[in-house]
Image: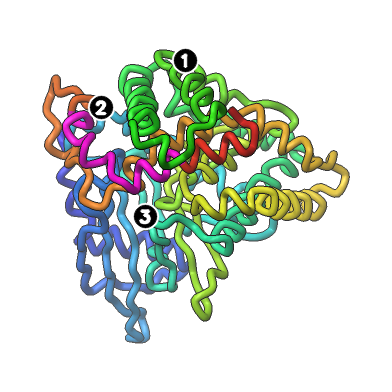
Amino acid sequence: MLQDPILVGLENDHHFLECILRGAEGNRDLEVTAAEATPCCKSGDNYMSSITRVLISGCDRSGKAFKRSVLMKRQPANVVRRLTFRCDPAFRNETCSYETIVPLMAEFAGCSMPFPECLHASSQLIVLQDLKPLGFGMADRLKGLDLDHSLLALKALAQFHGTSLAMKHSEPEKFQGIRSLTTELAFSQDSEPVFGASVENGLKMALIALEEKNSEKTVGSSWTFFEAVHKLNLLRGSVFRRLRAAVQPLEPLGVLCHGDLWLNNMLFRYENNTPTEVKFVDLQVMRYSSLATDILYFLCTSVEPSVLSFYHDDLIVAYHQSLTETLEKLAPGAPQIAIAQINDQIEDLALFGLLMGFLLLPAITVESDLIDLDSMQHGEDLASKFEQQREQMMSAKYRERVRSLVLYFIERNFI
């Protein structure tokens, strides 16, 4: 499908912008006088969308001037890229999340969820509140999240998960209704040709890093390490199948999960250089699964290695405390979740976190621009494009993070 010229021009469509602002702010007298659009992401940063920041100027009926900033998120212009990354179902998922799931959960909880306000959502275009003017910003992707950032993120995640558990208990029919709106995106049968190759490539790259001759100098020559690498080698050819099995919900810890919770999908606000609030973005992969999948995904992709190694237990305790407080507040009669239940599922599903870490670490640690996917042509193999940049992605930082992650798994007896 060719890109719709009507959608392309919406950044400068004053009538459209007036409609979404009037609806969001409950003021029918707002008039837009100017709109300035600028790209929000570098080429290749986002596989499944392109994002534009639009600064809107206007006034109300009394003549009082205002300025607003919004983000317009649409499907990529490149048709091959849209088909390859299944952007149609991704946008349907995100539209349902912003339009129905998040508002109903917020209504049930009596408070906002940790997501930006959505002003408009459709299968082609999503308009979101721009968090940057409110003081939110991204953390350092190359460094990873320190303890303060990690604790804040996990507490917010637990509130989201706790609301899901409480609603499932108190309003089961309504919860089942919003649960049914989510569609498995990453691990559906339709995703296997592309995503299956990607996760296999993630494992392949990790094994190359782990099996290098200088690995012994870095991690020691312990039998435990070499045994772990041997076990990882045995996973070749079965990664997608194992990940697909891991995201199947395990009760009673089945919740609505973010599904793609890594540090590029979270924004932090600060006071005196201390993070005080976090918002999660990108709801295209929202699914109903074990809460442990979100926790593991976050821990294995986003937390600074030393923090992960030294403070794993503290992080889970903080998550559990926030989950318990949310559940007690919203559904006092619901069965409590013991921290042992969470730890058991983290251990049972640990491989999910490791393999997703292997998948994302090349993108997390690369210092230059990623592959420009807008140049993809029909018949072009995505795996071959990543193969061309393997050496660039396999930096010293990448090798260090992969080895640290495996050592963390060995320390925790996860592997």
Q: Position of residue 375 (x, y in %)?
A: 12, 37
* Quarter in which the C terminus is drawn: top right
Q: Which of the two labelled residues, at mark 3 and mark 1, occupies the earlier sequence position?
A: 3
Inter-mark Cα distance, 3 to 2: 30 Å
Q: Is residue 93 visible?
A: yes
Side (left or right) of 376 relative to 350: left
Mark 2 residue crowding within 10 angstroms, few (<14) / some (14–19) / many (20+) = few
Q: Which of the two labelled residues, at mark 2 and mark 1, occupies the earlier sequence position?
A: 2
Side (left or right) of 334 relative to 217: right
Q: Which mark is residue 234?
A: 1
For residue 98, above or below residue 292: below
Residue at the disc numbered 2: 83
Span shown in magenta? 385-403
Side (left or right) of 254 relative to 38: right
Mark 1 residue crowding within 10 angstroms, few (<14) / some (14–19) / many (20+) = few
Q: Which of the two labelled residues, at mark 3 and mark 2, occupies the earlier sequence position?
A: 2
Q: Position of residue 60 (x, y in %)?
A: 36, 79
